[in-house]
Each structure stands twice: as structure tokens, then as C-alpha cells.
Image (tube, rainbow, N blue to C red):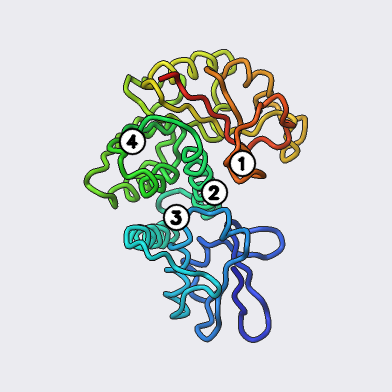
Amino acid sequence: MRIPAWPAARLTLQPRDDAHGRTSFVRAAIDESLWPQSHKAMFGASALSNRHCVTLEAIADIVMRHTGEPPQQYSRTNTDNVRDTGRILAEWLREMARTSAQTRISLKQLSYFFASGSQRAYAIATVLNHIAHRPIKRMSDVGTGVGMIPWLLRTDFPEISHFELFEPEPKFHPALDLLWTQRDPAHSYTLTRARAEQADFGTGNDLIIFCQCSYLVAREERPAVLKRAWGSLNPGGVLLVNEVMKNASVFGTSHPDLIDRNEMMAIMPGNHRIFLKQSGWKKAEDIRRVPAWISGSRSMLVSVRDA
């Protein structure tokens, strides 16, 4: 999404701030000086193809607030639910950006939650629509942060009636509660202030996700955590792991905390398959045939319990 700034400089909006002077959606949501009223805005191609529809609507709402028009070359959804949810997310984003100092969540962290949540929710929804699974009525998200991914998935799977959100970091809880108070009354949620090692997944889950948090679990505890999550699933339930694995080029080979791909293959329960961004999240692959550097935000490891 690019917006010409007066008189000649060009302001480029993207998910996160970077060293090239490009500005995050979150910073643009709060800084009025970045928005010349007489200019247009547009999405980049990658944003349109890899973001959740609700976050696109939230950004469109922010653009319209400042320019009076939606982003150029962007066709707004005709679904009232997505538009309304996008408007709620935009308001939450503005409020969080304004109060980042009080909430102790930095703009960088907020940008990460917004951008990564958008990408991962889009990918997860696409994967789930291309595998056979039971109806998803109960979902758990481990290391949920502010709960962005499951909050977005409500529009894709309105049949979900309860969300269990595991997040041990107290500083994220106010932002999570503020976001989740804006929800359909049919959707209930529970915030469990526990690490994965202490998580009690109970029974009756239809979907459990681990997004870039398994590496934080003590190595000796990882098999037990995944086994406990697997055992809590209903027949036909889904266990999904999105994890940067060791030797992934994004971190290099020396990052000490990443999970080795062979370890992940050994501890992941069930007959697991991997879905890749390069195939549009629509094709299951054998993880042994996929290079480790493709893992991370570009892959989803999935196991479905036998029905």
C-alpha cells in the first residue's frame, strides 16, 4: 500500500517498520501527520494475496478515515460481517496504537501481532478448507499473544462456539480482552494464563494450533505437550503447528532455540503432512521432501485424528 506524501516524498505502508523508512499499518493508524488528505492509497499485490480479508478491511477503514476513499485497486467485500469485523479491528488497532505506552505493548509488537496474525489466519483457514476434518466447534490457541489468529478465524468458521486462549505473558492480557470483548455473543473465550508445559487441554477440542511457540517449550517437555494436545482432540480433530525449524535461512544455522526438523517429525503425533505457501496452502506434502528453510511462516504442519 503506497501513499504519496506532500510535496514529493513517498510514504510506503507495510505490515512492519523497516530500515528503508517504510511505515507500519499500526504507526499510520495513529500518526495523523503521515496522511496528506488530498492523495490516494493503494495496496501492494502481496498484501492482497496473503492477508486475511478482515485485516484488509481494517486497513481499508483506516485509509478511508484519512483520505475519504478506499485503497485504489481494492474491491471491498460485500459481506457485512467482514466489513463490520474489519471496522472493529481498525478501532482496536487505533486504540492500541494510542495507548501502547500504557499497555506496555510496543508498536513493533503490535505490528507483528497484526501482520503475522493476518498471514497465519489466512493460511490456516485455507489449509482447513482443503483437508477433511470434523466441524470446528471448540478451538485452542497456544501462545496466542493478543488472540489475533483465532479472533480472525471466527469469520471463516462461525460454527466455533468456544475458544481457549493460552498466554502466559500478563502484559498481553488487557489488549486481548479489549479485542475479544468485541465479538459475537455466540463466541465465548477463556484466557488461560499458563505456559504450554502447564496447559490442561481437557477434552473435546476440534482444533489446536501452535504458532511459533513450540521452540519456547523446554525440549524435554515438547513430546508430552504435543501428546497431551493430541489426546484432547475429538476424532477428526486437527493439530496444527506453524514453526520456524532449525537451519531455516531466516535465522541461520546457529540459532540455538529453534526445533530441528527431525525432532519435530519425531514428536508430531499422527500421520502429519505439511502445507506450503508456495502451493497456496492447498496441497499436502511429505515433510521429509521439504527443505528446512521453507518452514516457518511459509509452512503449516498438520495432523488429523482418525475419525
Q: Which residue is mark 4?
A: 163
Q: Which residue is mark 2?
A: 119
Q: Looking at the picture, which amino acid does disc 2 mark?
A: Gln
Q: Position of residue 144 (x, y in %)?
A: 44, 37
The answer for how far apart the CA atoms under marks 2 and 3 are is 23 Å
Residue 54: image quadrant is: bottom left
Mark with earlier residue (4, 3): 3
Determine whether, in the image, residue 86 is placed left or right of residue 242: left
Q: Which residue is mark 1?
A: 297
Mark with earlier residue (4, 2): 2
Q: Quadrant of the C terminus?
A: top left
10 Å neighbourhood of mark 4: few (<14), some, or many (≥20)? many
Q: Looking at the picture, which amino acid does disc 4 mark?
A: Phe
Determine whether, in the image, residue 55 is placed left or right of residue 73: left
Q: Looking at the image, do the residues carrying marks 3 and 1 touch, with CB atoms under 8 Å apart?
A: no
Mark with earlier residue (4, 1): 4
